[in-house]
Amino acid sequence: MSKPFSIAIHGGAGTILREKMTQELQDEFLHQLEKSLRAGHKVLAQGGSAVDAVVSAVTVMEDSPLFNAGKGAVMTSKEMVEMDASIMDGQDHNVGAIAGVQHIKNPIHLARQVMQDSEHVFLIGEGAEAFAFDNGYAFTEQDYFFTERRYEQLLRMKQAQGFALSESEYPDDDKHGTVGAVALDQQGNLAAATSTGGVTNKQYGRVGDSPIIGAGTYAENGNVAVSCTGMGEFFIRKMVAGDVAARMRYLQEDIATACDTIIQGELKRIGGEGGLVAMDAQGQAHFSMNSSGMYRGAIDTVGNLTVKIYSDE
Ligand code: ASP
């Protein structure tokens, strides 16, 4: 009999309201979440690594225009995309992260490449892209990432002179989000991955929590794997992913207590909106959010698949 394995994902948190969601869009989200979960689960079922599983799951969402990562990334104030991503292998604490890349179709692949084939753990902008092209990545034109919806969203946000989560209710209510995955493989290894376009109308050069290990992403064998989504400025201040791991490690809190204490307490107290997906060493997933919704799903250790959107589900 195979050892337990499991995967869980998120496709972004924010103000997601039933009354503003069409049936068609909702179905499409649920379909993409399921597709992502099945891609990651297949890797695990075949005995593959948690690292490969989270990359497979995230790749599906990066390739969909629905989510704020890869193809569907939001735009900066300069009407460009700048994407961030990170990955952590819980087995050896190895990490790879990139920020501010503009011509990479699947940022999560590059984050893994940095982890596996670079002497460094975090590359940004031009240097990250130079490393990518040296390793055979194709140059992807900005046009590939351009979607009418993202452009309209940017124009509305510019008018409001603000910046916001892609799932922000005001002034735009298009439903898209940062993506992430956590997994436990049959060898008992945990991994976490996160990929994002950031926040709409961000100052160019701005980096959020997603590529920052300990803020948006963390994984540690025998303990927990975490991927966050929400207003990065707050997740960085509260070192959310690392703090979940620390609470479980030092206080022996269970996964639900550790996650909810931070998301509903510490983070909310300083005005931080968002959520996370976490997985413990037994493959039990937990979702925590203080926003009205978070696209999310899991395939648990007995193979049950669930996909959800709203916080009251
Ligand atoms: N955490 C991301 C950032 O701040 C945004 C998101 O989760 O939608 O860049």
Image (tube, rainbow, N blue to C red):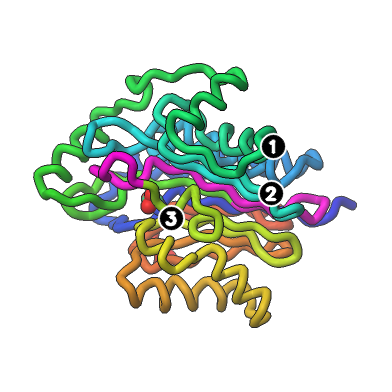
Q: Earlier in the sequence, mark 3 or mark 1?
A: 1
| Residue at x 47%, y 37% (from the top left corner) | 124
Residue 215, given in percent of the width and then of the height, sits at: 49, 59
Nearer to us of marks 2 and 3 is 2
Label 3 beta carbon less than 8 Å to ligand 1? yes
**Label 2, label 3: how far apart the Cα atoms are:** 21 Å
- Which quarter of the figure has residue 226? bottom right
| Residue at x 68%, y 33% (from the top left corner) | 117
Bounds of the magenta segment: 182-206
Q: Quadrant of the C terminus?
A: bottom left
**Residue ID for mark 3:** 229
Look at the image and tell me whether residue 34 can be seen.
no
Residue 153 shown left or right of residue 283 in the figure: left
Magenta stretch: residue 119 in it?
no
Q: Earlier in the sequence, mark 2 or mark 3?
A: 2
Inspect the image, locate mark 1, and give the three-letter code of the amino acid beneath it: Gln
Q: Can you say whether 6 is above or below 76 in the image? A: below
Q: Earlier in the sequence, mark 1 or mark 2?
A: 2
Residue 6 shown left or right of residue 150 in the figure: right
| Residue at x 55%, y 37% (from the top left corner) | 108
Look at the image and tell me whether residue 152 can be seen.
yes
